[in-house]
Image (cartoon, rainbow, N blue to C red):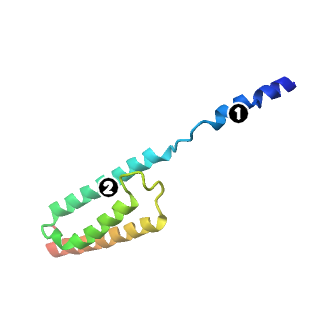
């Protein structure tokens, strides 16, 4: 019985486990998610510019939102987890933008 324990806990066998490198698995998934978020955001910008000829009035809001999205969801490996406060700030900015677009749509006549 002791030989089986000796075999399981032998220094050579344990050393193999110690030398294995741990590679983070979440990084590629987060980078892919960040790319999807930024792509969707740029599509939103394109659709707004297409729908509203005076969308240039929103350039300051879009610039602030773009910067926040780039910081929160970067396309490099600098951020592996997203801060909840940053997400809330982006959601708040998107809600403000939605209200402004709704008002612009009303002013346009809702066509």
Residue 97 sits in quarter? bottom left
Q: Which residue is mark 2?
A: 38
Can residue 102 be seen from the camera position used here?
no
Residue 14 — which label? 1
For label 1, the SS is helix
Q: Is residue 70 left or right of residue 83?
A: left
Q: Is residue 96 left or right of residue 20?
A: left
Can residue 67 be seen from the camera position used here?
yes
Q: Is residue 2 left or right of residue 7?
A: right
Residue lying farthest right?
1
Does the CB distance between marks 1 and 2 fall below 8 Å? no
Mark 1 surroundings within 10 Å by alpha-carbon count, few (fewer than 14), some (14 through 19), many (20 or more): few
Where does the N terminus fall, quadrant-wise?
Answer: top right
Q: Position of residue 14 (x, y in %)?
A: 70, 33
Residue lying farthest left?
53
Where does the C terminus fall, quadrant-wise?
Answer: bottom left
> Which residue sits at x=77%, y=31%?
9
Q: Position of residue 17 (x, y in %)?
A: 65, 34
Residues 42 and 23: in front is: 23
Q: Position of residue 64 (x, y in %)?
A: 30, 70
Residue 50 sits in quarter? bottom left
Residues 19 and 59: in front is: 19
Residue 53 — which label? none
Residues 78 and 67: in front is: 78
> Which residue sits at x=15%, y=66%?
52
Residues 109 and 45: in front is: 45
Does residue 42 sit above or below 108 in this rendering? Answer: above
Q: Nearer the viewer, mark 1 or mark 2?
A: 1
Sequence-wise first label, 1 or 2: 1
> Which residue sits at x=18%, y=73%?
57
Q: Position of residue 94 (x, y in %)?
A: 33, 67
Give how far apart the Cα atoms at labels 1 and 2 are: 45 Å
């Amino acid at each position: 019985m002791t030989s089986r324990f000796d075999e399981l806990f032998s220094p050579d066998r344990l050393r193999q486990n110690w030398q294995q490198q741990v590679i983070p698995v979440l990084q590629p998934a987060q980078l892919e998610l960040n790319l999807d978020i930024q792509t969707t955001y740029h599509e939103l910008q394109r659709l707004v510019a297409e729908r509203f000829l005076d969308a240039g009035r929103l350039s300051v809001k879009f610039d602030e939102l773009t910067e926040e999205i780039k910081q929160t969801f970067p396309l490099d490996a600098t951020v592996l987890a997203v801060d909840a406060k940053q997400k809330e700030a982006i959601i708040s900015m998107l809600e403000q933008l939605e209200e402004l677009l709704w008002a612009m749509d009303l002013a346009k006549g809702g066509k």
